[in-house]
Image (cartoon, grey):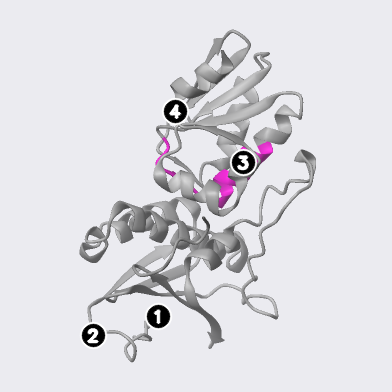
Amino acid sequence: MELSATTQGDLLVVTVCESRIDAAGAIQFKERMREVTDTPSSRVLLDLSQVQFLDSSGLGAVVAVMKLLGAERKLELSGLTPTVEKVFRLTRMDRVITIHPDLREGLRDAG
Amino acid sequence: MQADPFCQTRCLPGAMATIHLESEFLAVREGLGRVLCLPDMLTLGADLRGMVEIVLVEVLNNIVEHAYAGQTGPIEIALRLCPDRLACHVQDRGRPFPPGGPPPGILPEGKTLNDMPEGGYGWHLIRTMTTDLHYSRSEGINHLRFCIPIEAKPPLYG
């Protein structure tokens, strides 16, 4: 599970460099996120623009990461591809997590 | 395992494609790749193919996690593309569903961040995107049959 992380001010941007977050990769995703979010930041923006597919295990892993970060450190998403967006919408997770249309919007809102 | 042409009475006759895979998460990923490359699947739009992938991955992962629960075993997927639906029949030799059959797929919700469940979303996705879901067990084989509507269905949530 390849993730790349960059710090922009008080924002940590994590890009998932994989095409899927599914049952075969959800645990590694969670573990890698735990490692990269060790870098302090007030918010974490998860860039999913390269992820073409996410299943309920992947969704559960995103929820686990939100809990890991705690209420004080918000997790936001950007760049959802159509199938990934559908999973977040049908599970109504889009009401719980801030979703930016793309990375640029996510960064601008951080402004 | 023999796939039965269960939707013969309601659909136009058509070729049924059958895919076999072992009960393992990586095999599910690879098997889905084969499903999505079937000639019939390539006629569907990207959106529908995404729906088919979500439903099948949830059904198959459920078999890996709960029916076989760590053991390996065969899974067979039979698919028939009809004018208005994709009819699916999935078979495995794992444990049966608990009494009451497949879960109703009620969306798990949490009031606060810490209450939010990390699982339980799979059956909600399956139930939302399928019709005519039917489960039966005979001679040690689980049979799950369902259809994925491929047109003329209004959006599920505004």
What stretch of residues is rendered in magenta?
A51-64
Marks 4/1: CA–CA distance? 46 Å
Q: Are marks 4 and 1 in contact (CB under 8 Å)?
A: no
Q: Residues within 10 Å of mark 4 (few under 14, many from 20)?
A: some
Q: Answer with mark 1 or mark 2, whichever residue precedes in sequence.
A: 1
Residue at screen point 53% across, 65% down: B128
**As rendered, which of B100 and B149 lies closer to the eye?**
B149
Q: Determine whether the residue tagged by mark 2 lies in a helix, strand or loop.
A: loop
Q: What is the x, y in percent for residue B99?
A: 70, 80
Could you say which disc has been placed on residue B13 in the image? 2
Mark 2 on the same chain as mark 3: no
Chain designation of label 4: A
**As rendered, which of B154 and B1 lies closer to the eye?**
B154
Q: Residues within 10 Å of mark 3 (few under 14, many from 20)?
A: many
Marks 2/3: CA–CA distance? 42 Å
Chain designation of label 1: B
Chain designation of label 3: A
Residue highlighted by disc 4: A102
**Residue B147, picture quadrant:** bottom left
Residue at screen point 46% across, 44% down: A84
Amino acid marked by disc 4? Asp
Marks 1/3: CA–CA distance? 35 Å
Task: Work out whether B151 lies above or below A59.
Answer: below
Residue highlighted by disc 1: B1
Q: Are marks 1 and 2 in contact (CB under 8 Å)?
A: no
Mark 1 on the same chain as mark 2: yes
Residue highlighted by disc 3: A61
Does A54 appear in magenta? Answer: yes
Could you say which disc has been placed on residue B154 in the image? none
| Left or right: B103 in relation to B83 | right
